[in-house]
Image: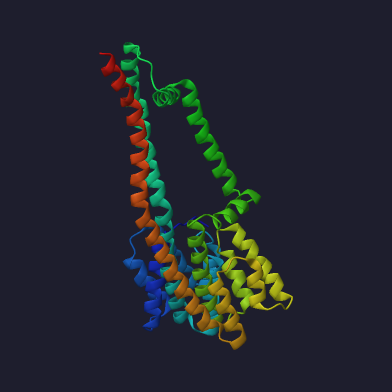
């Protein structure tokens, strides 16, 4: 089977459009034909052509999607299978469209919250690096010819500039790149190292709260929809766990599944997992006692989605002034160190 890759945006397009067509009474094969005519990406065209051929030969949609693990998560396939069995495939695709839309928006917010600070720091370090390797050596040659004793701050700035321009500095830079690549390789291997990193990500200042709120929003939304579609709680958690990239969250949800199979209450195992917010735990307790988990999960999903959005916007609003202070302080220290000896030279003259 040939490899096919599509983006999240293309997957959302597929889900939303086929949901609309099926809800309008169009059968599966004509719907796929219309989507194939409207699609432009090569990956999407290959996917739709392959899917249409399989469906025409009598293969269920869920059976085909299960073969495309790089595109469709176990949760996505499980919901399609439930829709096929219950005869509610249009409604299921509508559920998935909502999930895909919300998760894509949440992912964009998380990426924006993480990428923007890294870009600001990168630009800041680039500016400081340019000053140290291009501007400082000019002043160093000037002061060397004057023979004037230099202040401690100036000597340290010049020494650091010399280190960056030396062979040791170049080796340190290359070594740092290799360390980053090695850590990235270890993280991608999905072992204990990655699980520890994934756990620490949830404990980071500011970012940890955003990651936790995003997880609670996604969990509440997906589990609520699956329970509403008739999927048992334990199986719903298993499906959602299989679609997570955070290994620590996967392990905690796996522990929850085993505890639920032993007959423990949902609120009890959720509290022991230590991955849910206090608001989510309170809602789970209310929903479990009253037997209204589905509407409770809907409320929890909306609450945590709004909280995630608010925290991301607040973080981005805070970054601009902080970055200006950081760049200004760094440049200011270097300039003071460089121009301070000029006063001594002027006095001597």
Q: Is residue 52 visible?
A: no
In this rendering, the answer to whether 238 lies above or below 247 is below
Total numbered badges shown on the rendered structure: 0
Q: Is residue 151 visible?
A: yes
Which image quadrant: the C terminus? top left
In this rendering, the answer to whether 207 lies above or below 330 is below
In this rendering, the answer to whether 295 lies above or below 196 is below
Residue that appears at 51% across and 34% down: 176
In this rendering, the answer to whether 205 lies above or below 212 is above
Residue that appears at 58% across and 74% down: 281
Residue closest to the far right: 262
Q: Quadrant of residue 123?
A: top left
Residue closest to the far front: 347
Tell me residue 172's x, y (percent).
50, 28
Q: Quadrant of residue 125?
A: top left
Residue closest to the far bottom: 290
Residue that appears at 53% across and 31% down: 175
Q: Nearer the viewer, residue 291 or 22?
A: 291
Q: Nearer the viewer, residue 131 or 264?
A: 131
Q: Nearer the viewer, residue 317 or 268?
A: 317
Tell me residue 327's x, y (percent).
35, 41
- In the image, taking residue 311 as reference, residue 285 lies left or right, namely right
Tell me residue 185's x, y (percent).
57, 43
Tell me residue 287's x, y (percent).
57, 83
């Amino acid at each position: 089977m040939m490899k096919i890759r599509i983006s999240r945006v293309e997957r959302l397009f597929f889900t939303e459009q086929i949901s609309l067509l099926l809800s309008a009474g169009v059968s599966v094969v004509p719907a796929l034909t219309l989507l194939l005519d409207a699609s432009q990406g090569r990956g999407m065209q290959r996917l739709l052509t392959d899917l249409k051929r399989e469906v025409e030969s009598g293969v269920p949609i869920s059976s085909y999607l299960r073969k495309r693990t790089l595109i469709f998560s176990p949760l996505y396939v499980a919901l399609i299978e439930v829709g096929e069995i219950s005869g509610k495939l249009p409604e299921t695709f509508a559920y998935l469209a909502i999930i895909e839309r919300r998760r894509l928006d949440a992912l964009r917010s998380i990426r924006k919250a993480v990428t923007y600070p890294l870009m600001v720091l990168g630009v800041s370090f680039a500016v400081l690096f340019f000053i140290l390797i291009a501007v400082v050596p000019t002043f160093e040659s000037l002061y060397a010819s004057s023979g004037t004793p230099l202040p401690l701050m100036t000597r340290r700035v010049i020494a650091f500039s010399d280190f960056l321009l030396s062979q040791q500095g170049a080796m340190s830079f290359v070594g740092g790149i290799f360390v980053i690549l090695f850590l990235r390789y270890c993280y991608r291997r999905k072992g204990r190292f990655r699980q520890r990193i994934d756990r620490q990500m949830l404990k980071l200042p500011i970012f940890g709260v955003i990651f936790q709120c995003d997880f609670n929003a996604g969990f509440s939304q997906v589990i609520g929809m699956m329970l509403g579609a008739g999927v048992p709680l334990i199986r719903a958690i298993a499906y959602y766990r299989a679609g997570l990239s955070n290994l620590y969250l996967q392990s905690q949800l796996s522990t929850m599944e085993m505890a639920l199979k032993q007959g423990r209450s949902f609120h009890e195992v959720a509290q022991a997992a230590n991955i849910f917010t206090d608001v989510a735990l309170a809602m789970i307790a209310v929903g479990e006692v009253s037997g209204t988990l589905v509407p409770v999960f809907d409320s929890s999903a909306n609450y945590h989605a709004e909280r995630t959005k608010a925290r991301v916007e607040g973080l981005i609003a805070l970054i601009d002034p902080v970055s200006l202070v950081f760049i200004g302080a760094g440049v200011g220290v270097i300039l003071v160190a460089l121009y301070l000896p000029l006063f001594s030279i002027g006095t001597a003259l």
